[in-house]
Image (cartoon, rainbow, N blue to C red):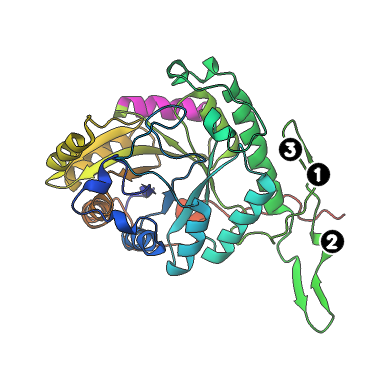
């Protein structure tokens, strides 16, 4: 295998990323809202030795509009809570990382820190977090605590044209900082559990985080002991400069959306130029994989009434052709890829049973898991608590 292994993840969302995926003959729409459906998908991803899965989530129903419901009834609407899904399926898997999406905008970081630390314990050190901002007025209306302007077409790709974005990303950075401090607020070994002396906790190893910022004031410590990984990896999706800056400041992994190898190189250079030397850069790709991929895509487009488009590049072809593309783009400096299966489970199985063996034949992907934690899969060392050695 090459000195630096290729990292592969999959992004799971409903019946797949094509809006008509649920109508594909191989789809199982009646099972979407069952634990077994999600358990089967993640088990398949683990059989393919993938680094991790991400689970999509949001604070509003899916929509084709930028902001607000579209009234459509011919596409999947509704999701499970991603953190709860990950916690449910964690005991059914053993190696693959589990990275749910959770918003920073309308969620208290104290609650996020506890939920994600719990997931890390339940999974034995395989939790991660896709931190996401919520910039839609309709989502804010669910909570009634703040007013966000309506997101319009001219704001897409130009975050500076939507001033609320700067505040949302500043808030997100503060939220991640609070969560990270809370994860560190229990030093390793703070739980003594000595029945003979009656001491369960070493109180000197629990710390107030005392965070004071524009958006949060958090005392701490956390109610959950330090996670098994110390710091579960934080990930973020980014399309432009402002979210790149957020990822460089706050994340361990960033998902970017170039549409060719040249653009991938430019994005990697821009992200690295922000001082993010240790940040892992993954490219997102929507994938239709298989000998019949083009026919399936055309059929789904016809069912949906429109040609499918995406923020990410769309690949349609065989496992060998996809392997060619990934290895070509990798030369741009990418660390890995997050693949979005167009149809579940069809394109997920094509990844695990077609693409992965093809990459293995080219000595470009692992043949077995070499680590037991998500940080281990990503080559990230386990950090020491920032409060280690200090005393109250």
Q: Secondary structure at mark 3?
A: loop
Q: What residue is shown with label 3?
A: 216
Secondary element under disc 1, as helix, strand or loop, is loop
Q: How many marks?
A: 3
Identify the image quadrant of residue 170. Answer: top right
Q: Principal SS element in the magenta part?
A: helix
Residue 153 vs 133, above or below: the answer is above
Q: Which residue is mark 1?
A: 210
Asked if the stretch drawn in magenta spans residue 116, the answer is no
Q: Residues within 10 Å of mark 1 (few under 14, many from 20)?
A: some
Give percent across and percent down for residue 311.
36, 30
What's the residue at 32%, 63% (across, down)?
A: 47
Q: Quadrant of the C terminus?
A: bottom right
The numbered mark, 1 or 2, whose residue comes first in the sequence reads: 2
Marks 1 and 3 sit apart, C-alpha to C-alpha, by 10 Å
Viewer-nearest of labels 1 and 3? 3
In this view, the residue in front, 264 or 17, is 17
Check disc 2: other Cα within 10 Å, few if <14, some if 14-19, many if 20+.
few
Q: Is residue 336 left or right of residue 200?
A: left
| Left or right position of 224 against 340 | right
Which of the two residues, 242 or 168, is positioned nearer the viewer here?
A: 168
Q: Give how far across and how far down residue 337 sits, in percent.
A: 36, 42
- Evaluate if marks 1 and 3 touch, with contact meaning CB atoms under 8 Å apart: no
Q: Closer to the observer: label 1 or label 2?
A: 1
Q: Which residues are magenta?
A: 262-273
In this view, the mark in front (2 or 3): 3
The mark nearer the N terminus, 1 or 3, is 1
Q: Which residue is mark 2?
A: 204
Instruction: Give the spatial CA distance, label 1 vs label 2.
Output: 16 Å
């Amino acid at each position: 295998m090459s000195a630096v292994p290729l990292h592969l993840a999959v992004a799971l969302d409903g019946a797949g990323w094509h809006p008509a995926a649920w109508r594909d003959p191989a789809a199982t729409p009646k099972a979407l809202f069952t634990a077994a459906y999600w358990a089967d998908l993640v088990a398949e991803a683990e059989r393919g030795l993938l680094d991790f899965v991400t689970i999509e989530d949001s604070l509003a129903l899916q929509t084709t509009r930028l902001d607000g419901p579209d009234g459509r009834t011919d596409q999947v609407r509704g999701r499970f809570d991603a953190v709860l899904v990950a916690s449910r399926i964690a005991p059914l898997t053993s190696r693959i990382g589990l990275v749910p999406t959770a918003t920073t905008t309308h969620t208290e970081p104290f609650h996020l820190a506890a939920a994600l630390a719990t997931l890390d314990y339940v999974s034995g050190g395989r939790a991660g977090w896709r931190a996401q901002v919520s910039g839609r007025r309709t989502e804010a209306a669910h909570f009634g605590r703040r007013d966000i302007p309506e997101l319009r077409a001219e704001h897409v790709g130009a975050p500076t044209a939507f001033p609320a974005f700067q505040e949302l990303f500043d808030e997100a950075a503060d939220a991640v900082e609070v969560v990270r401090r809370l994860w560190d607020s229990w030093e390793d070994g703070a739980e003594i559990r000595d029945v003979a002396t009656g001491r369960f906790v070493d109180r000197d190893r629990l710390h107030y985080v005392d965070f004071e910022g524009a958006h949060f004031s958090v005392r701490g410590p956390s109610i959950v002991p330090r996670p098994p990984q110390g710091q579960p990896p934080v990930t973020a999706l980014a399309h432009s400069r402002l979210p790149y800056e957020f990822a460089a400041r706050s994340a361990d992994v960033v998902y970017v959306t170039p549409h060719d190898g040249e653009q991938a190189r430019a994005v990697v250079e821009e992200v690295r130029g922000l001082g993010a030397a240790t940040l892992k850069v993954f490219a997102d790709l929507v994938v239709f994989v298989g000998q019949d991929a083009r026919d399936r895509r055309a059929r789904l487009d016809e069912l949906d009434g429109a040609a499918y488009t995406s923020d990410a590049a769309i690949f349609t072809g065989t496992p060998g052709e996809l392997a060619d593309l990934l290895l070509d783009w990798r030369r741009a400096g990418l660390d890995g890829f997050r693949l979005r299966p167009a149809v579940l489970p069809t394109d997920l199985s094509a990844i695990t049973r077609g693409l992965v063996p093809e990459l293995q034949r080219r000595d470009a992907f692992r043949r077995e898991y070499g680590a037991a934690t998500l940080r281990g899969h990503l080559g990230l060392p386990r950090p020491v608590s920032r409060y280690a050695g200090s005393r109250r």
